[in-house]
């Protein structure tokens, strides 16, 4: 099979993996080498589902020994199959980089033959890039669950970021849709990567020549909507993953109905709005000081699709508001709808000089159309409705514009059209401003 035909098949097969990010690594160039992975050398260009399109994103192979119900590459699917050799992966990456098409490589794979064999091929691919081609650009590689620890550990010496995809949020979901996989086999390499990151960082403090181990950290992916798991269960899992394994990012992928199976939900389009709300809530966990239990309760385990999670939380806790913008501490400012991390810091700096009024906070980047119902400036309330849950909810709901949602389209490496999703506040998935 021609190399271009392989690229068409395996780049298209990789588009369902969204745990792809080029942030967090500072690998520098070396004499006679090419490329670098410092922040200025990586071009961040995100699609609406969170994928970075500046990377060559491919599977090593789509031959798979597993038969996961939700996966396009499952063993029983009648699809085009092919595989790259490690030499082909290295050659493609270098050629694309030299033509300025990409800034790095995202390399994943279905499990071919067995986990160890697949991990050996992935390891050989990135070693060729680092050793033979002196490539110092960004490399994100998958750790294959079930592979020997020494293979994963060695791969961590050459990769900038690694990821182990959990895929389904619960053990029940795995048993139902991916019975050949287990929770323990997925979490074990996560634990291994995390412990080695810490070990290498501590050693580097003593011995400066210690090589870097996965300097960009690790990430994972959860498929949303393939199982009946609630948003509360998903957010509690993400919260625990951040705490236990120090993950850089949990990615959420709306389930795409590509397979027919009685165990799968009968839906026409992916639950993109739900995915979007989970991304917003994820930012609240990481940067705004919220916990999963604050955002959702057992009696309301799913996010309100009409409002972003912080606005919904504020409405449900209206007794805590209004907050005086000139007196509230940083932690409280972050809980005001319409106030992001940057605008909260600007408020702290500006009010040292003078008391802020409503016009001042507009200039500082506060989204006043939401914030006005939860704050006072110099003791004055600027909301255009009484301060109660029902009135504010109705008023905010009336401001929500009805936007026609286009058909969902996965981005293809060979597509001429971007996978765009027309939400006004979609940028918050990238910036985290809520």
Image (cartoon, grey):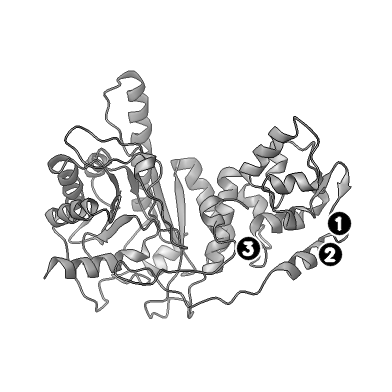
Q: CA distance from mark 3 to mark 2?
A: 20 Å
Q: Left or right: 310 with respect to 31?
A: right
Q: Quadrant of residue 308?
A: bottom right
Crowd rating for badge 3 (residues with CA inside 10 Å; few <14, some 14–19, many 20+): many
Q: Residue at label 3?
A: 303
Circle 1 packing at 10 Å, graded few (<14), some (14-19), many (20+), is: some
Report the residue that reaches farthest toward the top. Answer: 206
Residue appearing at x 67%, y 57% in the figure: 297
Image point (40%, 49%), residue name = 219
Can residue 142 be seen here?
no
Relative to 15, does residue 283 appear above or below in the rendering? Answer: above
Q: Can you tell which quarter of the image residue 289 is in?
A: top right
Q: Which residue is mark 1?
A: 387
Horizontal and vertical percent for residue 279?
Answer: 54, 57
Residue contact between numbered discs 3 and 2, judged by CB atoms under 8 Å: no
Q: Nearer the viewer, mark 3 or mark 1?
A: 1
Q: Who is closer to the viewer here, 206 or 265?
A: 206
- Residue 317 located left or right of residue 422: right
Q: Quadrant of the N terminus?
A: bottom left
18 lies above or below 397: above
Residue 391 numbered mark, or none: 2
Q: CA distance from mark 3 to mark 1?
A: 23 Å
Q: Specify which label sits upstream in the sequence, 3 or 2.
A: 3
């Amino acid at each position: 099979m021609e190399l271009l035909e392989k690229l068409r098949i395996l780049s298209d097969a990789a588009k369902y993996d969204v745990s792809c990010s080029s942030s967090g690594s500072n690998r520098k160039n070396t004499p006679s080498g090419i490329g670098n992975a410092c922040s200025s050398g990586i071009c961040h260009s995100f699609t609406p589902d969170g994928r970075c399109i500046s990377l060559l994103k491919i599977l090593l192979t789509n031959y798979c020994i597993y038969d996961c119900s939700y996966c396009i590459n499952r063993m029983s699917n009648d699809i085009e199959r092919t595989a790259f050799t490690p030499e082909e992966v290295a050659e493609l990456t270098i050629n694309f980089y030299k033509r300025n098409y990409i800034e790095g490589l995202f390399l994943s794979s279905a499990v071919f033959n067995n986990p160890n064999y697949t991990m050996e091929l992935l390891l050989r691919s990135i070693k060729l890039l680092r050793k033979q081609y002196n490539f110092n650009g960004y490399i994100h590689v998958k750790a294959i669950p079930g592979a020997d620890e020494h293979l994963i550990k060695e791969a961590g010496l050459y990769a900038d970021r690694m990821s182990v995809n959990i895929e389904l949020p619960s053990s029940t979901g795995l048993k139902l849709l991916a019975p050949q996989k287990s929770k323990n086999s997925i979490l074990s390499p996560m634990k291994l990567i995390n412990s080695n990151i810490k070990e290498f960082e501590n050693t580097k403090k003593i011995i400066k020549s210690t090589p870097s181990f996965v300097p960009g950290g690790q990430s994972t992916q959860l498929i949303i909507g393939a199982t009946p798991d609630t948003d509360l269960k998903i957010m509690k899992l993400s919260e625990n993953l951040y705490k236990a394994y120090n993950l850089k990012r949990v990615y959420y992928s709306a389930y795409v109905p590509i397979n027919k199976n009685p165990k799968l939900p009968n839906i026409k389009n992916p639950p993109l709005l739900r995915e979007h709300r989970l991304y917003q809530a994820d930012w609240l966990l990481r940067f705004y000081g919220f916990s999963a239990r604050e955002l959702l309760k057992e009696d309301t385990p799913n996010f309100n699709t009409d409002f972003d999670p912080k606005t919904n939380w504020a409405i449900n806790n209206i007794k805590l508001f209004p907050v005086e913008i000139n007196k509230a501490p940083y932690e409280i400012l972050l809980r005001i709808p319409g106030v992001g991390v940057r605008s909260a810091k600007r408020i702290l700096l500006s009010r040292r000089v003078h008391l802020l009024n409503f016009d001042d906070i507009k200039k500082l980047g506060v989204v006043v159309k939401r914030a006005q119902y939860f704050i006072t400036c110099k003791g004055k309330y600027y909301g255009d409705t009484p301060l109660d849950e029902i009135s504010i909810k109705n008023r905010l709901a009336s401001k929500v514009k009805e936007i026609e949602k286009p058909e969902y389209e996965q981005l293809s490496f060979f597509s001429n059209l971007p996978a765009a999703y027309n939400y006004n506040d979609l940028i918050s998935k990238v910036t985290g401003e809520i």
